[in-house]
Image: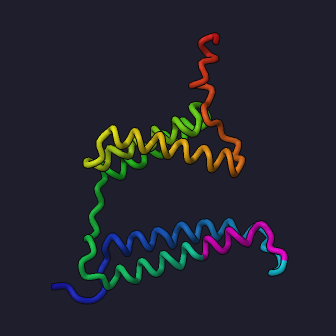
Amino acid sequence: MQRGPRLNIDVLAGLLFVALGAGFLAFAVQLPPGPPRRLGPGSFPILIASLVIAAGVCVAVAGLFKRDAAPLALDWRKIAIIGSSLIAFAVLLRGAGLVASTLALVMISSLAHPALDWKRALALGICLGLFSSALFIGLLRMPVPVVGPLLSFKWLGG
């Protein structure tokens, strides 16, 4: 029986959070934070990045001493599927729009989870696409098309 700290999936996840938080923090500190009474554009990103780093440290430290944590074993097939879904999302976003690219992301990434059938993945993708559109385009006014030019049928002469 192994005693003491050991590397497992929780430690890896915590270190990933720390790395992502540090990357965001590196960009966030370039924005002016402003004085405490009148916070500038850098205040919120610095706060969020710091919280992500703190959460990562907590997860990693807790994972070091967790006895029943899953051992560190990477499934490269699943990693490739998830990576492919992210690439598909990025490629489709401007041309197909947010709903279709989100649907593609969910459908492709569902291949990494054998228990998720295509009907549930389809429903999840549509709901997530519509929710993302309402949030990012409707509320946050991001300049991303809901339905892109590839799906607008204008290229058919209509």
Above/below status of 83 relative to 96: below
Residue occupying the point 59% across, 35% down: 97
Residue occupying the point 32% across, 38% down: 118
Q: Nearer the viewer, residue 113 or 5?
A: 113
Q: Quadrant of residue 105?
A: top left
In reply to whether residue 85 is colored magenta, the answer given is no
Magenta stretch in the rendered image: 38-50
Quarter of the figure with the C terminus: top right
Q: Position of residue 148 (x, y in %)?
A: 61, 30
Residue extending farthest left: 1
Q: Is residue 150 left or right of residue 61?
A: right
Q: Is residue 132 left or right of residue 127?
A: right
Above/below status of 61 relative to 126: below
Q: Quadrant of residue 39?
A: bottom right
In reply to whether residue 46 is colored magenta, the answer given is yes
Q: Quadrant of residue 75?
A: bottom left
